[in-house]
Amino acid sequence: MRSGVMRVPQEKDADYLALAARHRPPTPVWRNAVRAFVVGGGVCVVGQLVTDFFEVHGQTATRAASPTAVVMVGLGALFTGLGLYDRLVQAGGMGGALPISGFANAMVAPAMEYRREGLVLGVGAKLFTVAGPVLAYGLGSAFLVGVVRLVVGS
Amino acid sequence: MSRSTRQFEQVAVVGHFAAGGAREGQGPLAAAFDQVWDDDLVGETTWEAAEAKMAVDALEGAAHDGGWSLGEADVVVGGDLLDQLVSTNFAARQHHRPTLGVFAACATFAEAVGLAGLWCDRGSTRAVAGAWSHHLAVERQFRFPIEFGYQRTPTASWTATAAGALALTQGTGAVQLRAFTVGRVVDPGSADPMDMGTAMAPAAWDSLQRHLAAVKARWDDYDRVFTGDLGVVGSGILCDLANDPGFVRVHDDCGRSLYRPDQDVHNGGSGTGCVAAVVAGHIMPRVETGEWHRVLVAATGALFSPTSYQQGESIPAVAHVIELEAYRP
């Protein structure tokens, strides 16, 4: 259709999408990378301090890993409950989302959100709405790697 | 073509009411709001109930501003973004007035006001039209649980916690509803739900051109031409599409008006309540005082659902246009 000054863009209009792309502000890649480094690095420093704490109290480096994970998950859950963890990820992107504390955030946020729909159809059914893909594909790939290890290792 | 536009001689907009949440109440339009809800739950127990409460407040406020009560309204027309229009219908459960629930995403407000105008145009009727949205209720439906952390892209809009309503009646008042153009659904092929401006700008341009042709006007005839919530990105695109300094001079955008750039809302405000609150709180008073004589509002809506974009569908959009004019006897 042609009317007025310019035709109205219609389905899959490549010219229009190119025009629109020029108005899109660029993603601040470098700023995001620096923030992710600072936030992710900060989370790792906290994790290291927790590991050191367990090592000082008689655990080996290997054995300190499990309680450290528990503490980091607990901290992620705590800061999610305080309404602060989402701000950390908004600022630090993957620096906040990727560590295990971010996984805790992905589990606790739906648990809080869907409490109002009840314990069964709310929390129970929707607990994995965000973390579900990570678990499904994480378990799937762990299984595949295990099979490869079994075949190659024997 | 002009059969899709209805012009009114005798529809007065006699009352208006605008309200916003805490973040909106800290924005540039703070003084425009009749009410600011600092409490996210507005005294209710769920975000959805809070949105229904906002709807009742807005409808009552507009009727009251018009010199009558909501109980005297013959028809209520309204809409929201939630599944099955729950907040609009749950508000109707409370106010008990005959109600039309309408949906055109963020273009809902213009559709509601236009339909109320059609109603008032024939016969002595009082109608209240409005739209409302609650950031947290919409966020959990369209995106993620509230406390889940993720990084919003630079083109993403912020769904406003806001409500706005107008009271209309047959006759003449300080402000007249002059015309209503029903929009066509336009889909330029954009599939990014974090970039509504790109998806909606063509629909806005389509409806604005059709409205202009139908009422035989030029851009110079208007003091302002507001689009709904194209935001920074969509407004830039629209001005490019228009390629007309006369249009660029009068164009403004509701989504861009609601927040300051430093409020971390990226592209600007969106949501059914955004254009409603800006029209009721920011535009209406200026037309009432005669500061602006003639104003167009093209409310824009992105007509997608979480299911449709997950299935890879592009985002169709619509824009409905209403024209307000200061009454000069």
Image (cartoon, rainbow, N blue to C red):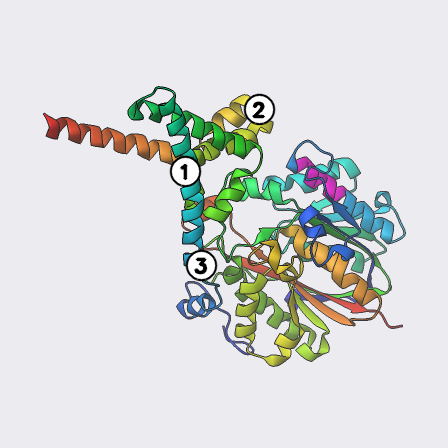
Q: Which residues are magenta?
A: B48-56
Q: How far is disc 3 from disc 1 in space, using C-alphas? A: 28 Å
Which residue occupies the foreground of this view, B101 or B50?
Answer: B50
Q: Label for residue A118?
A: 2
Q: Dot 1 corresponds to which residue?
A: A45
Disc with the residue nearer the chain's start (2 vs 1): 1
Residue B250 in percent (x, y) is at 67, 74
Specify the quadrant that holds the C terminus of chain A. top left
Amino acid at dot 3: Thr
Per the image, label 2 sits on a secondary structure element best described as loop
Chief secondary structure of the magenta portion: helix
Q: Quadrant of residue B84?
A: top right
Tell me the mark number nearer the camera, choosing from 3 and 1: 1
- The amino acid type of the residue labelled 1 equals Val
**Label 2, label 1: how many angstroms apart (C-alpha)?**
38 Å
Query: Disc 2 is attached to a residue of which chain?
Result: A
Residue B114 seen: no
Residue B5 or B24: which is nearer the viewer? B24
User: Is B280 drawn above or below residue B178 in the view shown?
Assistant: above
x and y, in percent, of residue B324 in the image: 75, 66
Q: Residue A60: where, in percent of width, then height? A: 30, 22
Using residue B245 as the reference point, say whether residue B32 is left or right of it. right
Q: Identify the element where label 1 is drawn.
A: helix
Name the residue tied to disc 3. Answer: A27
Helix or strand or loop: what does disc 3 sit on?
A: loop
Tell me the crowding category of disc 3: few under 14, some 14 to 19, or many 20 or more residues within 10 angstroms, Cα based.
few
N-terminal of the two: label 3 or label 1?
Answer: 3
Can you say whether B256 is above or below B243 in the image? above
Badges 2 and 1, same chain = yes
Q: Where on the picture, by quarter, is residue B289?
A: bottom right
Instruction: Classify mark 1: residues with Cα within 10 Å, few (<14), some (14-19) or many (20+).
Output: few
Q: Are marks 3 and 1 on the same chain?
A: yes
